[in-house]
Image (cartoon, grey):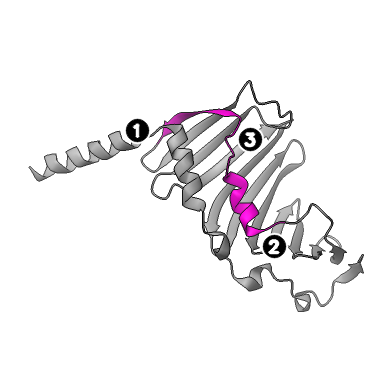
Amino acid sequence: MKRIFTLVLALAGTLVAMAQTPEEIISRMEAAMKGYEEKGVVMTADIKIPIVGTLSMKNSSLGDKSYSEGRMLGREVRIWDDKTTTWTYDSSDNTLTIENKTTGKERSTEADADLFSGITDGYDVSIRKQTATEWHLLCRKSRSNTDKDAPRTMNLVVAKDTYYPVSLSASMSGVTLTMHDLSFGVEPETVTFNPSDFPDAKVIDKR
């Protein structure tokens, strides 16, 4: 009897999961991410470029500060931002470039979290497949979507237990962008530039 009861419960859970529409899944995903801006957001973005290779950037943001680090072809680049200043370290020539942040480059934790808010606007969404832990959604560009820069298709994966996005990938002009490993919680020192970490770097101050 216990085995039958367990089987019925598992089947019921599967049916409930299957009953959710793509729109309901996305709505719950956006709701699950609200309110976490104050904790900070961490996300990895992989950019695959033909012939050149894949650039992977790990991005962390907390309030009005952010930090990004990436490596490609043996070259490491690290970037810090706050309200007014950008610091860029390039390992290829051991240089540290300091610049005033230009208009339009402002970024915040809320902006990073909102990358997934409204991401399917202008797309027809369907459930491509699902596993025990994830929904795999296929987003096809709607005929009414007149944005020329919008990719024709996107693949969005959502976790069933948390409704957090697991990954989002899209391709345009041969370049493939995949965002993944989203998490919350960033320490202030992670996004704060510390000049003592680069005592031997050549400083290029453009302010």
Tell me which numbered mark, 3 or 2, is placed earlier along the sequence.
2
- Label 1 with label 3: CB-CB less than 8 Å: no
Left/right of residue 123 with respect to residue 2 in the rendered view:
right
Q: Please, what is the three-letter code of the amino acid marked with disc 2?
A: Tyr
- Nearer the observer: mark 1 or 3; the answer is 1
Q: CA distance from mark 1 to mark 2?
A: 39 Å
Where does the image place residue 36, in percent across and percent down from the top left? 53, 59
Q: Which residue is mark 1?
A: 18
Where does the image place residue 10, in percent across and percent down from the top left? 23, 40
Instruction: Tell whether position 124 is magenta.
Output: yes
Where does the image place residue 56, in percent across and percent down from the top left? 67, 50
- Disc 2 crowd, CA 10 A, few/some/many (<14, 14-19, 20+): many
Q: Which residues are magenta?
A: 107-130
The N terminus: image quadrant: top left
Tell me which numbered mark, 1 or 2, is placed earlier along the sequence.
1
Q: Please, what is the three-letter code of the amino acid marked with disc 3?
A: Ala
Q: Is residue 164 visible?
A: no
Q: Of 74 and 79, which appears nearest the observer?
A: 79
Q: Secondary structure at mark 3?
A: strand
Q: Of 6 and 40, which appears nearest the observer?
A: 40
Identity of the residue drawn at 65% across and 46% down: 46
Residue 170: numbered disc? 3
Identity of the residue drawn at 57% across and 60% down: 37
Q: CA distance from mark 3 to mark 2?
A: 24 Å
- Does 33 sit above or below residue 155? below
Tell me which numbered mark, 1 or 3, is placed earlier along the sequence.
1
Q: Which image quadrant for residue 41? A: bottom right
Identity of the residue drawn at 55% across and 34% down: 155
Q: Is residue 58 visible?
A: yes
The C terminus: image quadrant: bottom right
